[in-house]
Image: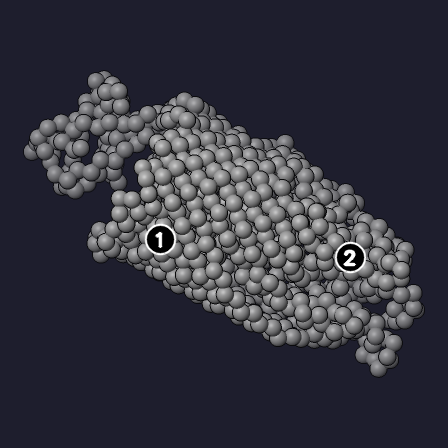
Amino acid sequence: MQSLSTYAQHVVVGLVKDTQGQPLAGATIAIRGTSILTKADSIGQFRLSVNQEPPFFIRASFVGFKPQDFQILKFESTPLQLTLVDDALLEEIVVTSRRRSEVLQDVPIPISVVGRAQIEESGSFNVGRVKELIPSVQMYTSNPRNTGVNIRGIGSPFGLTNDGLDPGVGYYVDGVYYARPAAATLDFIDIDRIEVLRGPQGTLFGKNTSAGAFNIVTRKPSFTPDYSFETSFGNYGFIQAKASVTGPLSKKLAARLSFSGTQRNGVIENVRTGKFTNDINNLGFRGQLLFKPNDNTFITLAADASDQQPDGYAQVIAGVVTTKRPAYRQFDAIISDLNYTLPSRKAFDRKIDHDTPWNSGNELGGVSLNAETKLGPGTLTSTTAWRYWNWDPSNDRDFTGLQALAKSQNPAEHSNWSQEVRYAGQLTEKLSGVVGLFYIDQEVKINGTEESGTAQWRFSQSSTSALWRTPGLLEGYGIYTNASIKSQSAAAFASIDWEIANGFHILPGIRFNYDNKDVDYKRVARGGLQTTDAALLAIKTGVYSDQSYLASADERNFTYSLTASYRPNRRLNAFATYSTSFKPVGVNVAGLPTVNGAAATDLAVIKPEDTKHYELGLKSTPADNLTLNLTFHNSDIKDYQTNVQSPQLGVNRGYIANAEKVNVKGAELDLSLKASNYFSFYGAAAYTEATYVKFTNAPLPLEETGLTLNGVQVAFKDISGGDLPGISKWAGSLGGEYATPAKFFNKESKFFTALDGYFRSSFSSSPSPSAFLNIDGYALINGRIGYKATKGFSAYVWGRNLLNKDYFEQLLPAGGNAGHYAGVLGDPRTYGLTLRFAL
């Protein structure tokens, strides 16, 4: 590949041409990692003075062509011939989702890949914004703890998070499993790409991933020095700064240090305090050390920490429903008796008057040691990690300026350590695969407080007795919880890809899994009026009561998958998959409903989910500049783990339970087109149907709270045939970019203009279908314009939600189900300027 002329001064000469043999006049040839460069002349020839000894790399680049590195091992006597590939050809994307480097289109799994440039330029800095690029992904968050990430509508119960339930979507960063859903709200730091695998992947990843996985790959330490600095400014006081530095510390040791900080003012006005809430206040860093003792071994020590301290996640009253309770228990009657008026009944006035601060202290971090060594035909990898999560909240759960729930918070501390060992690679010409072992040990400690204020008596009033008006009866009365969950999970997994005939592959996979969970739940009710009056005590215990229970769960599972793939040529890959998967057994740790005054301990442990999954897919490259992929999927889920919304204050608004059977099916389309050197487009669409095939013991929707039949209180409802919450039947994204080559500051760069659109149809925001808690479909348009350079200075202006669309992300009933419900609002139009400098 390399051929050189050597002179006393070490001058390298050669020729740069395209794939048709035509010379590329003006191409740049540089010694990588230095400022030494030259230009090709009118017939593509160049002369480059070199002041160092081999080995080293030179990089050839030209506008409209892919940059190419060439390694110089020694100086030779003949001219160097360099060939660059036209950038109009669609770039092959390499992924590591199957624990080895492969071309995306060759992998018989539906995978979406979002690269670093698209993440940064679109203003995306966490999963919540990346979901707009991948319509099969749903993320809902009413605060970092109550965050659910779903793929195809399944993975986590919609609404509130219960710490006793494992997520069904795996979240991995450089091979390290992030156990808590709050991880999805942290800022991305130095991301190289995000690979989103759709469908069960338990035979590829350490922790079970029953609905799919995020495989996030960060930029690694490099022995070539590299520096990048970025700052952004926008409306609502938005400021973001990022920096990344990498380079060698010695011949065998390299490091990378990255930092990110984001601030933004609030977008909801608290008329009581005069402050704007729902701001952003994030800091994070990531450090890595790479030890490379030889060409076959890489050892990486990584540490990261993220600290989020927003005055945020306040929810705005979105509406009031008339429930089935008596007239005096309706929300409007309650606030009328208390001489209170809402600051606005229009959610998008973005006004609240909450009297309890909204704080969402969210700290995450950890340390990991990853060792990879080439061993025989494959690579042996060991990943050891310790991670922590500290959650420190304050909420106004009655959503009003009244002192109903004066305090409502469940601080939690989580820690885990995990170990994964796997061997993966191309074992023979016809056989590749991965085999691994995984173990994780977790503990969550919860120290919760829920306390009544001066108005709580009126919201809790369940009879017309004058005793409810007893001064101070419930003021300061509440529950104080100490709970813990200890869990262990171990697994052995394997997956192989065997080409049994030319182009025809069989891919079997198996997984053995063990899960154990122990929960210790204790809560004490105290405070309020001290009395020995039996009638007053009955009122108090009817609102809050002591509750304690011990529960344990032990589960063993065997799951498997079988895929058949046919690749007749490089342009086509058709595949069919059948797989089984599961979500581990769950334990309730947010309080249980009471039956005849006693905790319903039969609900303390819920069954694991059992999924049977079918999938048909076609990956195609009809032309060098076009990819078109289509997938059909169907999942039948037994004992689906779901949320049950409860009107009882003492169960922290909900608990988890099993729905007998759920079905999710749909189709997905992904398209990417490089129309020319200047135009590129992408598109994705998803159609999803998700229904409760059988759920006979579901919670009542908000409007049916208080329903009685023949004088008997109705607590549950058969919602078989109803839609699952949080899932739009239609969702899609579409975007394009126009980029033209230019010179700026004597550097090769591109001026670009880009637009991205995201659409989803209406969806239910209630665990049980409701006539009121439905969210209308909406579309968002984002854009950016500017110029970018690989090295040197880049700048662009960006805008999100350019049409300033008002939309809800979630609707949630208030604690106690008095009839009012609140909305999690999508951000209004935001815009800003980003400046970046790279060396």
Residue at mark 2 to residue at mark 1: CA–CA distance: 50 Å
Give the SS element for disc 2: loop
The residue indicated by pointer 1 is 434
Amino acid type, mark 2:
Asn
Give the SS element for disc 1: strand
x and y percent of residue 154 in the render? 58, 49
Q: Nearer the viewer, residue 2 or 729?
A: 729
Amino acid type, mark 1:
Val
Q: Residues within 10 Å of mark 2 (few under 14, many from 20)?
A: many
The quarter of the picture where residue 193 lies is top left
Tell me: 298 left or right of 341. Answer: left
Q: Nearer the viewer, residue 620 or 241?
A: 620
Outermost residue, left side: 8
The residue indicated by pointer 2 is 817
- Residue shown at 61%/47% (left/top)? 663
- Residue shown at 64%/53% (left/top)? 661
Tell me: 359 left or right of 167. Answer: right
- Asked if residue 367 shows in the view, the reply is no
Q: Residues within 10 Å of mark 1 (few under 14, many from 20)?
A: many
Q: Nearer the viewer, residue 682 or 231?
A: 682
x and y percent of residue 118 in the render? 46, 37
- Residue shown at 44%/58% (left/top)? 511
